[in-house]
Image (cartoon, rainbow, N blue to C red):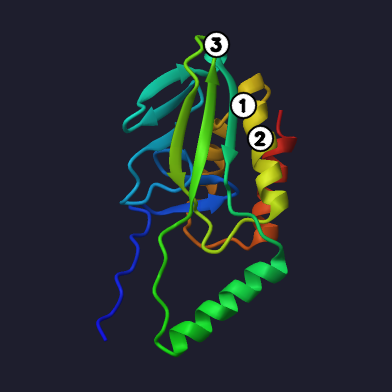
Amino acid sequence: MEPAPVPPAPQKAGCMVGLFWIDAENVHLGTPGATATSEVLLAPDTLRVTGATAGEWPWSEVTALKVLGAPARSAALRWAGRAATVAAAALDLWVPASPEEMTVLIGTRGGADVEVVVQSGAASAYTRREVDLSHELLSRFVAGASSPAALSRWWEVRSETALLRSREREAVLEEWLAEP
């Protein structure tokens, strides 16, 4: 039996926290996988989309930002999925799946509402709380009450690619939400 291809990992060293992928250069919604056809990049001053629906908007022009289809499962279902994957791999039956896709909805003052498909950064799924906290943070970016700069600052201090457990990711999201 021929080995199955392994889905490409993100191209750069970085870390997933909630719906965000943070690396030395960008804050992404979703992961910057090699097969991604578009990306949503969050900068302190602008929201930028690459790919077929490319565009760039200052935060003052963004009226809504939401992610639909983020895979969220309970801890029990995430653990069951991991156990099934390990068992299938041990039996040489496992074929790696591509990352799940999510849809980013961007509303703008100019009426140019945009939908962008991005890849999930979660190996199995996010926690429901992680998705909710991420959406709360996105709402704060849109309202001007917070900035993606907080995520970049966190990366500058941390700069490691270790995987965070779901509770650790939730704690980081809560820390960002507590910042002015």
The image quarter containing residue 51 is top left
The residue under label 1 is 141
The residue under label 2 is 137
Helix, strand or loop under label 1: helix
**What quarter of the picture does the C terminus occupy?**
top right
Q: Mark 3 or mark 1, which has the lower sequence index?
A: 3
Which of 37/12 is in front?
37
**In this picture, is 113 found above or below 73?**
above
Labelled pair 1, 2 in contact (Cβ < 8 Å): yes
Q: Position of residue 114 (x, y in %)?
A: 47, 25
**In this picture, is 45 found above or below 38?**
above
Q: Can I make out residue 180 in this image?
A: yes
Q: Position of residue 10 (x, y in %)?
A: 37, 54
Q: Residue furthest left?
A: 2
Three-letter amino acid code of the residue under disc 1? Phe
Three-letter amino acid code of the residue under disc 3? Arg
Which of 28/88 is in front?
88
Q: Position of residue 35 (x, y in %)?
A: 31, 51
Three-letter amino acid code of the residue under disc 2? Leu
Q: Position of residue 157 (x, y in %)?
A: 53, 46
Helix, strand or loop under label 3: loop
